[in-house]
Image (tube, rainbow, N blue to C red):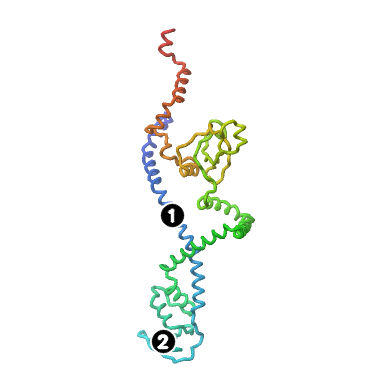
Amino acid sequence: MSSALNQTDGPTCRQPQRPFRRAVLRGLGVVLPPLLTIVILVWVGNTVQEYVLVPVETVARHSLVWSLADIHEKAPDGITETTVKPDGTMEMTVKFEDQQFIRLEHGQYIPVHVYEMVRTNLGTDPMPETGDAVYHRYVQLQYLKRQYVIPAFLCVFILFLYLLGKSLAARLGRMFWNLFEQLFHGLPLVRNVYASVKQVTDFVFSESEIEYTRVVAVEYPRKGIWSIGFVTGESMLDIRCAANEQVLSVLMPTSPMPVTGFTITVLKSETVDLDLTIDQALQFVISCGVVVPPQQIQDPANERFVAALQSPESTGNGQADRRADKTPTPESASSS
């Protein structure tokens, strides 16, 4: 008795939670696509900034400091001036060749205009103690401002990608790239990660060398199992002669990575043309059949769906089911 009550109470307790869960899942379905898109774009931007922009900026800053730094370990021969600041500290400057140098705490001398620019733009940071550190901050403020560095970096980066692509199109560049890939494929752990990443990047960024004409459905690998394929051509003449009818070459993509697959030759009469674009078919394959185009959803309100149910094939199946039914019809009952 108690078990029966528990069985009847179980669905009743879970039933109020189903609308809430459906609403939450609908909300996730709406929020997750734009949220994940923003997260991926932010992650790509941070990755490029951390591993590309920052190292390039560091190299450029060191190069500019090396070429611009005017640091003296001893006071240059010139006119020495000592001034007292309002806070009581003394400041020693040396005028040499129409340029004033100021003495730092470590005893080094740097130009006054460099020192003043850094001092007036410190913000909450402390004043650098060495001449090299002051020049690094000076170069950052004077030459490497972000509003100028980022556009210049993007232009140089795009130009670098263009030159790299042009060089890889040549025979010498492709040879060096093949040697570089062989080095990656020789590393035990790296080659697995590199192969997976290369498949994704080749699918996203590389131009497809295979021209798909249309999307078809084929009963493969056996009758009753339908698979989506891309028609790439009319296959070989010998196969057409042996089949004594038209044949098609069909690329069968694999889920969830359509960059891999295999090619089959099928009879044209055994293929079904699908009302799908190439992009919609790729989305269907990548999502493992989860993302179905709107025109292919089995909705009773869809005219194509209703017409398919009213087709002669479905009518014949209904008549066959009626014949298989053992329930006597009125005509059979009257005859008996």
Residue 36's place in the image compared with 281, above or below, is below
Which part of the image, by quadrant, shows the C terminus?
top left
Task: From the image, tell me which residue sits under label 2.
Answer: 91
Distance Cα–Cα, label 2 vs label 1? 51 Å
Type of amino acid at the residue the image marks with label 2: Glu
> Residue 219: image x %, image y %?
54, 33
| Residue in view at x 54 percent, y 61 percent | 164
> Residue 2: image x %, image y %?
42, 30
Residues 301 and 210: in front is 210
Badge 1 density bin: few <14, some 14–19, many ≥20, Cα 10 Å: few
Give the quadrant of residue 299. top left
Instruction: Please tell me whether mark 2 or mark 1 is closer to you in this view.
Output: 1
Residue 35's place in the image compared with 157, above or below, is above
Task: From the image, tell me which residue sits under label 1.
Answer: 39
Q: Find residue 221 and name its label.
A: none
> Residue 8: image x %, image y %?
40, 31
Which part of the image, by quadrant, shows the N terminus?
top left
Residues 270 and 284: in front is 270
First reached walking from the N terminus: tag 2 or tag 1: 1
Q: Is mark 2 on a helix, strand or loop?
A: strand
Residues 181 and 123: in front is 181
Q: Is mark 1 on a helix, strand or loop?
A: helix
> Residue 4: image x %, image y %?
42, 29
| Residue in view at x 41 percent, y 39 percent | 294
Q: How many labels does the image show?
A: 2
